Amino acid sequence: MEILFTPNALIALLTLTFLEIILGIDNIVFLSIVSGKLKAEDQPKARRIGLLLAMVFRIILLFGITWVLSLQESLTHIDWGFFKASPTGQSLIIFGGGLFLLYKSVTEIHHKLEGEEEGEKGKASNGLSAAILQIALLNIVFSFDSILTAVGLVSMKDPAQGGFGYEGALLIMILAIIISIIIMMIFAGPVSKFVNEHPTIQILGLSFLILIGVMLLAEGSHLAHFSFGNDGEVGTIPKGYLYFSIFFSLFVEFLNLKMKKSKKTVKLHNSEIVDDKLKDTDFTN
């Protein structure tokens, strides 16, 4: 507890909490879309259960950190000449999560654009238990990513060597997870309401999930040391690029929504000149 109140520990706690919230954005988007298909009275329950499951999975994985780190060891070696790989338990989980996210996102986009319109009957048929199962499966994948980030950020070395020690580091990571989940619980309702009220935001959210799915596939392939021919191992997609594209797309969409609500019509420069020329043009010939 004494280590927790040191300046370095507080900085690590704030930094890790912020990173956990950033890493939880994709979780909130997925929660919003899945819970949006439920009855109105079941949606808050699904969000709360989903975020609580995320917190429980992360804390359990923290206490089993030795097992989590052991998943980074190669299970087998594959050498087919044109394809080489050394898959690990972690890479298989992340790769499977990417496939699930791609399947779910594409299916939801197809349903919203070409499927039947959702009515109360459609929402009622989508059970709470099925939604929670989907949320739980994806939470497992997101939890691994979150925990490995936390372990990489918070040093478990002895305090004499500049670390926080095992117990101190564990306490910092658990507090960061709890604080970040509480913050996400506060904002999950308004975010879900906003997403479900705007169809364009829903499609953007599903597009983001496709991007995250591709990122997970690339990360899983990299951790499994996938190599095709002489091209070298598959690389990862920097998360900074991904989050920049997400925030930039949201910024553009917010501008579009604001312009839509505005009563004033946006008029392009030189539009009056073009209108005058069109009036004077004889189209009869």
Image: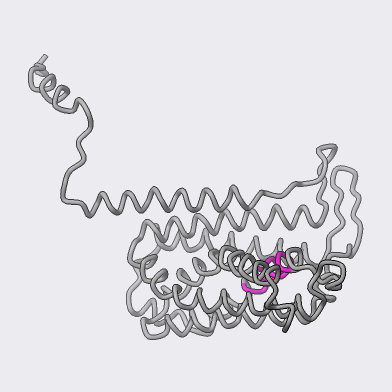
- 34 or 248, nearer to the observer: 248
What's the magenta region? 139-150
- Decide which of 100, 253 is in the foreground and name it: 253
Residue 24 is situated, as x and y percent measured from the top left of the image, at 57, 67
Q: Nearer the viewer, residue 85 or 19?
A: 19
Q: Is residue 102 above or below residue 146?
A: above
Judge whether 137 appears above or below 223 on screen: below
Q: Residue at x 45, y 49 (%)?
A: 249
Residue at the location (8% across, 22% down)?
Answer: 279
x, y percent for residue 194: 36, 67
Q: Is residue 167 left or right of residue 21?
A: right
Query: Which coloring applies here?
Result: one colour
Q: Quadrant of residue 26?
A: bottom right
Query: Which residue lies at the image location 54% right of the left edge and 59% below the top edge?
Result: 209
User: Would residue 123 appear left or right of 211 to someone viewing this image?
Assistant: left
Q: If the image is split into quadrants, where does the N terminus sit?
A: bottom right
The answer to whether residue 167 is magenta is: no
The quarter of the picture where residue 174 lies is bottom right
- Quadrant showing the C terminus: top left
Report x, y in % for residue 19.
61, 64
Relative image position of residue 233 (x, y in whole percent): 81, 45
Quadrant assignment, res 271? top left
| Left/right of residue 27 with respect to residue 254 in the rendered view | right
Nearer to us in this view, 116 or 274: 274
Is 148 contained in the magenta span? yes
The number of callouts visible is 0
Magenta stretch: helix, strand or loop mostly: helix
Apparent side of residue 7 relative to residue 32 in the rendered image (left or right): right
